[in-house]
Amino acid sequence: MSSEVLVPRHHFDSRSVAQAGDPFQPTDAEATLKEGFYPSSGLATAGYRSAKYSPEEWHINNFSTLHQAVTDRNNAERICHDSKTLYKETEAGTLHTQAEGTRHLGERLQHIHFWKSELQRHIEKLVAETDLLLGQKRRLLKSLDATEIPFAIATDNLTCRERRLGPDLVKDRVEEELLKEVELISSIQALLKKTLSQAVNQIKCNRDAKQTLELDWSDKYQAYSLDDQCGRYNNMSTDTEYHPNSDNLQDQLCNRDAWVSFTQDNLSVAQREEQASVELRLLVERVLQETAEDLRVQCSNVDQAFSQRCLQLTEAKTQLQLHLTQILDQIGAQERNIMSLQQALYDKEAPLRVAQSRLHQRSHRPHMELCRDTPQFSLVGEVGQISQTMSSLQQQLSAARSSLSHLEESRMVLEKDIGCKTHSLLIDRDKCMSHRTRYPTFIALSGY
């Protein structure tokens, strides 16, 4: 039997196209060839169609191939033409945009340089003005030395008395007299202290304004360096890189008007502080003198108030100590009473165990012997009586313990109050009155 090997078909099947099938779907013959089987033209293929193309299919395939080639060539020519046009347009636009960006960077550098120079000028003026104001501050401090000692003593007394504890922290006559003394000394130093406070605040404002200008100047210096570097970039620069997300920050930036307004506001604040500093330096220093007699009279009033207060504290402390002694005696008696009650309760435990054991043993009597006889009633009554007695003792023990707790609380309150009085005496008598012995004399307060 003879057989022949058929030539495998191409992927495109014109017969499938004619039959409205999928031109890219392989036929049975193609599937057979892909699997490695080659059909024969002998008796084994009888009744089946031959795997060869027909002439019509060959023409259709040839026409389709030529038509597709022409279409692809036309598309390629059109794309090349559009690409050249787009390249020329984008090249010109890119160069123009880059030139505009470089020009804008140059203008920006000029603006930054101008404002940076203004900031530098005002910074130097603030430094000079602050140095002059520091000299005035030193003069004010020296003028206050004559009255610093009385004021320090009075304020130290008030500060020490703030450390009094508990109920002793009261606004008494001593505190009132001390406040009057502070007010009296303050009236002498009123203008100097006010001027000194203004000088200190103005120095702080000058330094704050100077710091603000320096921060702005530093930012502009850095921005100038960055923009100068950006202006030097060109298409031949080797240190440029891709930054895909660099344009996403534009929404977070301020506009040019806000930038100018920020620097102008800083300069306005600096100019205002400069003018205020000049006016403060021109203030005439006025020295107000208070008589030494007024200060000494007030000092005597404070000392007298301290003496009276120390006497009151001593009397109160004595009474508290007396009550504390009585409370301690009562605590000892109550503790002994509690021990007696505990012993009484302990003594009732043995009789209770005996009675309960008798009842328990008699509960094992057999049959009719388990009857409620006289001993049974007696034992039940004994257990009840002992239990009631122990309950009464327990209640009395609880009351005694509660009373002892209250006594202990009273003891702690008294001891705490005595400690407060001792602490107050330490502050008023040993600390404050001892400190007041260094109060300036009449001659010293007169300025001699």
Image (cartoon, grey):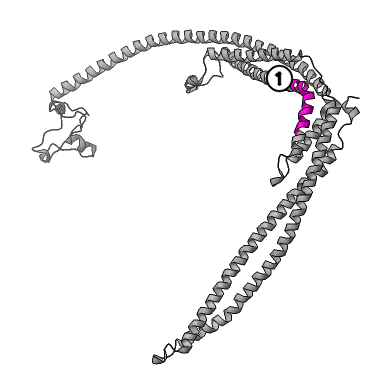
Q: Nearer the viewer, residue 274 or 164?
A: 164
Is 445 placed above or below 357 here?
Answer: above
Please name the residue shown 52% across and 82% down the image.
382
Q: Amino acid at mark 1?
A: Gln
Q: Quadrant of residue 170?
A: top right
Question: Could you tell me which residue is drawn at 57 percent across and 71 percent down?
Answer: 394
The secondary element bearing badge 1 is classed as helix
* Residue at x 51%, y 19% (from the top left corner): 253
Residue 191 forms part of the magenta stretch: yes
The residue that label 1 is drawn on is 202
Q: Is residue 397 above or below residue 277?
A: below
| Quadrant of the image containing the N terminus | top left
Q: How many marks?
A: 1
Residue 182: which quarter of the image?
Answer: top right
The magenta stretch is: 179-196
Residue 149, position as x, y percentages in the image: 83, 31
Q: Is residue 427 visible in this depiction of the protein?
A: no
Front residue of 132 and 104: 132
On-image quarter of the C terminus: top right
Say above or below: 181 vs 420. above
